[in-house]
Image (cartoon, rainbow, N blue to C red):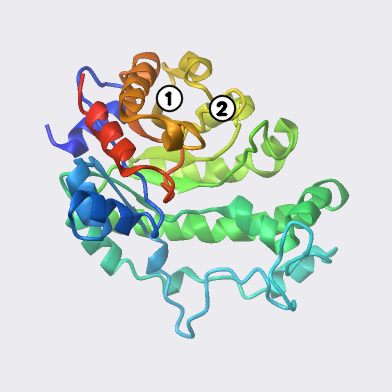
Amino acid sequence: MTSREIVKNIFTRKNTDGLAFWTGHPNHATVPIMAKEWGIEPDYEAIYTYLGDDCRWISADWGYRHPEGLPMFDTSWGTSGRPTLSAGGTFADTEDVAEVDRYPWPDPKYLDFTDVYAAIDRHQDKAVFTGLWSCFYHIVADFFGMENYFIKMYENPAVVEAVTERVVDFYVAANDKFFAGLGDRADIMFFGNDFGTQRDLMISPELFRKFVLPSVKRLVAVGKKYGKIVMIHSCGSIYRVIPDLIDAGVDVIHPIQAQATGMDAHSLAQYKNDLAFLGGIDAQSFFVNATPAEIEAEVRRVRDILGPNIVISPSHEEILPNVPPANVLAMARAAHTR
């Protein structure tokens, strides 16, 4: 079977004996370190080929081409600086829902996916993760400033809902356009928002269900409309809403941040009948400090617990320069070895 077929079986929880691996997307500073160690060209595709990577992540976001070069979302529009945890963005002081309509929202007519489709066509034997990244949670947080965003959920929920709706309206329309043209070139819709901290969700499960989950459901529905497997990314501890994500139709969770509360392999094993998994090899400290032999043993341990429907990968896709290349190679080899 091809890598694409193996991963599809894993993600649809039909795997019997297939093994699969995803490198993730190493930090740009990590690429030359790996390349020098292995004597290969310093580019991503050379690394993926060397490691026998079964997957490719090809985001559709770069299909947005505004004629004036404007980004999808300028969350500092009308302000003097970039929003932060404390400093507000465009809607920091907005109290009237009508003001939300005055923002220059992105238009799906500026989407051209020709180059994205061509990139996907080059990897038809691989499991391609695609779609717009659709990080609405972070964009809405930037529009308000994160602290202000959470406060407004209590003080002016109508404005929060209005901004969220406009952001997600675009992503729903954009993804619909993308998947309508994608056809059967790829099987997996991949989008992400970081809902968790090391210890818990950023907001309560109740607020998550009110302000976030409806948007997740809208995006999942687009993938399901086109018969795609839906994979969602969230770093951090999200164990308290995993049942909600399952009910929303999510098929796969990534990256399984192993050191976050409730996200270890044993805790997640209860969902094996409802979810497939991507990730699970701790990248916070273990991946940095372990020996290659320890990495191989951890791959086997995690696969024994969460398998057979798991694609082995780091618990964060952006492998940093402090990770020894030997450990990355050990993970890849163990992922493909019984």
Image position, residue 64 (x, y; %): 42, 70
* Quarter containing the C terminus: top left
Q: Secondary structure at mark 2?
A: helix
Amino acid at circle 1: Leu
Pick the front one: 75 or 229: 75
In the picture, measured across the screen, residue 140 lies left or right of residue 27, that is right
For residue 230, above or below residue 335: below
In the picture, measured across the screen, residue 318 lies left or right of residue 73, that is left
Pick the front one: 147 or 187: 147
* Quarter containing the N terminus: top left
Name the residue at the left extreme.
Answer: 1
| Whether label 2 touches label 1, CB < 8 Å | yes
Image quadrant assignment for residue 59: bottom left
Name the residue at the right extreme.
Answer: 155
Amino acid at circle 2: Ile
Report which residue position mark 1 lands on: 275
Image position, residue 16 (x, y; %): 22, 17
Residue 242, label in figure: 2
Decide if residue 190 is in sight here.
yes
